[in-house]
Amino acid sequence: LAEHRNEELPLHRIDHAPFEMSCDHFLRAITRLDERSLALTVLNGEAQPAVLMLPPKRGRVLKGLSVTTFSGEAIEPQRLGGGVVRLHVPLCSGLTLSWR
């Protein structure tokens, strides 16, 4: 994981999810929608998109990930080594994440 994210970024633990989360911008809200989905709001009002990293929890695999903005735009996840997923989040976005 160290090679994929800045170690100074906080790691957010998501109960009963197969991943944890770090972001290079402030996460204003994380709301659990059900056992396999959540909504979050990223405050990235700067001139660049946020980068959201989803490293898998030990022994877990992140399958069937679907990410959309609140306006319905799909975001394609990038799969990195070790099962880490990287997402480039559009400016001032709310996201819905769901997984299997």
Image (tube, helix red, strand yellow):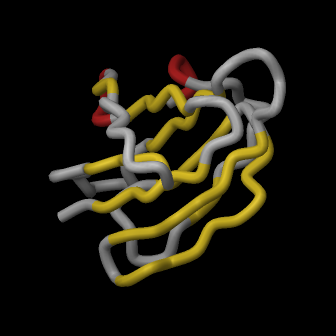
**Rendered image quadrant of residue 82:** top left
- Seen as rendered, the residue at the extreme bottom is 34
Q: Is residue 86 above or below residue 34?
A: above
Image coordinates for residue 27, horizontal then vertical, percent: 73, 52
Going 58% across and 63% down the picture, which residue do you hit? 13
Image coordinates for residue 88, horizontal then vertical, percent: 51, 26
* Relative to 54, 27 lies left or right: right
Image coordinates for residue 54, horizontal then vertical, percent: 45, 43
Going 44% across and 58% down the picture, which residue do you hit? 96
In the image shown, does 100 or 20 lie closer to the viewer?
Answer: 100
Image coordinates for residue 94, horizontal then vertical, percent: 59, 52
Q: Is residue 26 above or below residue 76?
A: below
**Rendered image quadrant of residue 97:** bottom left
Going 62% across and 44% down the picture, which residue do you hit? 93
Q: Is residue 96 above or below residue 47?
A: below
**Rendered image quadrant of residue 25:** top right
In the image shown, does 78 or 1 lie closer to the viewer?
Answer: 78
Q: Is residue 27 above or below residue 75?
A: below
* Relative to 43, 75 lies left or right: left
